[in-house]
Amino acid sequence: MILEVFAKKINDKSNLYFGWFVLVGVGLVQLVSNASGSLNLSMFIVPMSEELGFSRTLFSGAISMGSIIAALFSFPIGMLFDMKKTREVLIFSVILMSIATYAMSLVNEWILLYVLVSITRMLFNTPMMVGGSVIVAKWFSNNRGKANGILYAFHSVGMIVFPVFGALFIVNFGWRDSWIYLSFIVLIVLIPVIIFVYEDPSIMSIKNARENCNSSLRNEFSLKEALNTRALWILSIGTAVLYLFHSGINSHQASFLQERGISLGLSSVVISINAISTGLGSVCWGYVCDKFSIRFAFSSVFICTLFALLGLIYTHDMNMAILSSILFGAAMGGMLTVPSVAYATFYGTNSIGRIRGFTNPLSTIGSASGVMVSGVIFDIYNSYVLAFWFFFAVSIVIFIISLFLRNPNNN
């Protein structure tokens, strides 16, 4: 109650719509979710595998297990979102993420690795990533694309901060201390989340004519109604495929670059460029969603992905590594932003938690499959290239399917 009064005072004294403060709060949650992000975990695969004797497949299996658990919890958490408990879920997720990240420093056996990675990946995939976009959808309507683009730009900052700091801490203090220091970064974010993050404008009696968040769309879809639309399946399957690429490449990117003769330090630079490109791409894709059709935005993401995969496959030096990283980062910015805007635009916000809770397991399955595909193919062929060609072929198929995406509100 005291914090709500404090937040209302901030709103009364500021000419800025309070939704932008909320956006900062949920953006910071997305930032620290990268403690268990694929790029950050890729920094730890080599040092942890070398010291503990873990294979790439074993490490990949831990990441995939976390994605499976996230899929199991996705719908119940989505129901909490629709019950207007998103704020509480995000606060709890930040606390648990900090604890689990700290505990990663204690790993000696594979079983603890699986437990902790499963917890952190579950938090990453559903409460922290989906929860933020659910709140943004409720606070923004006319600027929904822009707001989602900024939201995932925060995520991209985390994609830079955690791999870079993780690599620096590993080089200077070892991988165990690195996990400890990263857990402190996660915990700091709890303060702005508690102060600024609220479910929707009605809780604080805030109105904004330009956003008009309290007005309904032409149609508000229930989960059952949404399941009967072709658009839901194209969006959910297409997004799952993008997550297949995302985890299959990002989780192994540092290892792939090192095998192409690029050092760990330079690999972290390339990954940081990937993150910067994802952030800029998120904002650009948000603009595209506000100005053009969702179909155009969604299909364009796959075109960008095709060029990125070709660049990655033919990477043999730093210049090509940077180019492919820029293209892949831009594609991943679209993966994050476009579906989030599409679900709220197509189906409204009344049941968005359940809808995202239903579709998100497909993304987590894609994420789990991608990291395993790359890991297993590497262990068999001692190369990641065949996995990347597989991703390329799948991308062509989904691009063609994406051309049939239509807004169900037009029917």
Image (cartoon, rainbow, N blue to C red):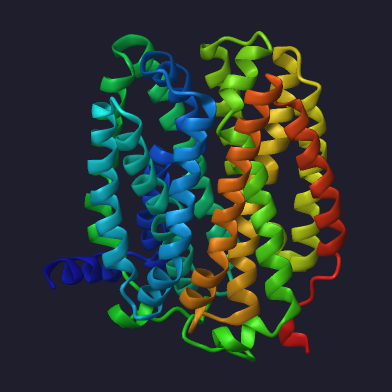
Q: Residue at x 28, y 21 (%)?
A: 176
From the viewer's side, name the closer residue of 11 and 158: 158
Against 302, residue 362 (above or below) is below
From the viewer's side, name the closer residue of 121 and 410: 121
Image check: 283 left or right of 407?
A: left
| Image position, residue 324 (x, y; %) | 73, 29
| Image position, residue 351 (x, y; %) | 49, 82
Q: Quadrant of the C terminus?
A: bottom right
| Image position, residue 405 (x, y; %) | 79, 71
Q: Residue at x 48, y 77 (%)?
A: 354
Q: Residue at x 32, y 64 (%)?
A: 14
Q: Quadrant of residue 145?
A: bottom right
Q: Residue furthest left?
A: 2
Q: Residue at x 69, y 32 (%)?
A: 326
Image check: 173 left or right of 162?
A: left
Against 378, residue 351 (above or below) is below
Asked if one can make out residue 180 in the rendered structure from this viewpoint, the answer is yes
| Image position, residue 301 (x, y; %) | 75, 51
Q: How many marks?
A: 0
From the viewer's side, name the closer residue of 251 and 142: 251
Q: Quadrant of residue 361?
A: bottom right
Q: Quadrant of the N terminus?
A: bottom left
Asked if one can make out residue 160 in the rendered structure from this viewpoint, the answer is no
